[in-house]
Image: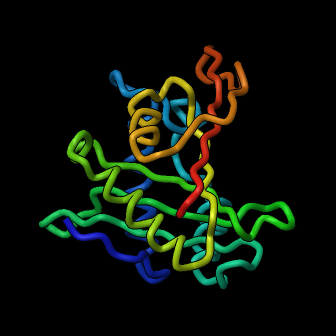
Amino acid sequence: MTIEKLPPTAFDEFLAYLNDHLSDNGRDGTAYFQPLPRDASRFPPEKAEAFRNGLRIEVGKPGWRRAWVARADDGAIAGHIDLRGLPENYTRHRCLLGMGVDRKHRQQGLGSQLIAHAENWALLAGVQWVDLQVLSVNTPAIKLYERSGYRKTGEIPNMFLLDGKHYSYTFMTRRLR
């Protein structure tokens, strides 16, 4: 497996992977990992455009984003991780983490590798804290983040109503050294 920076020119391939990944959201025993109902588990066009544009924005400027993909031996995207600046003023020392691993590559340590890769980049970029939000039912992700040094900072009970059920939202953070 190799991890490489996602260039804006490869965004369409990434978006196809991401939409396939999102098709697992809340289906066939997979926990909800995005606050989207099963029938709407696609990356919305306006968010895709903001993501694509964020890859071109200088780190520290509003809207910046950086992403990396893990490629399997056949060249297919096996997982991804991204960091993005927070929208609030005076938060340049922090960023938000998002990630996912393709169904064929879960439970093989790829998530930990992606996190380490992104955190190393963040340290070099001057980021001191990495924050994330995860649906509280996604215990595999929460356990991965805890093993990686993240700690829970809060939870909003019943934050989302998805497919007729309420889901809570967990907030986690890690200070980088």
**Display coloring:** rainbow
Q: What residue do we see at 52% from left, 79% from top?
A: 124
Residue lying at the far right in this picture: please name it. Answer: 89
Does residue 134 appear to the left or right of 141 in the view shown? Answer: right
Q: What residue do we see at 86% from left, 66% from top?
A: 89
Tally of numbered tags: 0
Residue 54: name its quadrant: bottom right
Residue 104: name its quadrant: top left
Residue 125 x/y as whole percent = 57, 79
Residue 30 x/y as whole percent = 37, 27
Depicted 98 relative to depicted 25: above or below: below
Residue closer to the observer: 153 or 103? 153
Depicted 127 relative to depicted 146: above or below: below
Depicted 63 relative to depicted 104: above or below: below
Quadrant into which the N terminus falls = bottom left
Does residue 45 appear to the left or right of 99 in the view shown? Answer: right
Residue closer to the observer: 50 or 117? 117
Does residue 66 appear to the left or right of 31 in the view shown? Answer: right
Q: What residue do we see at 47% from left, 29% from top?
A: 138
Residue 154 x/y as whole percent = 69, 31
Residue lying at the far left in this picture: please name it. Answer: 73
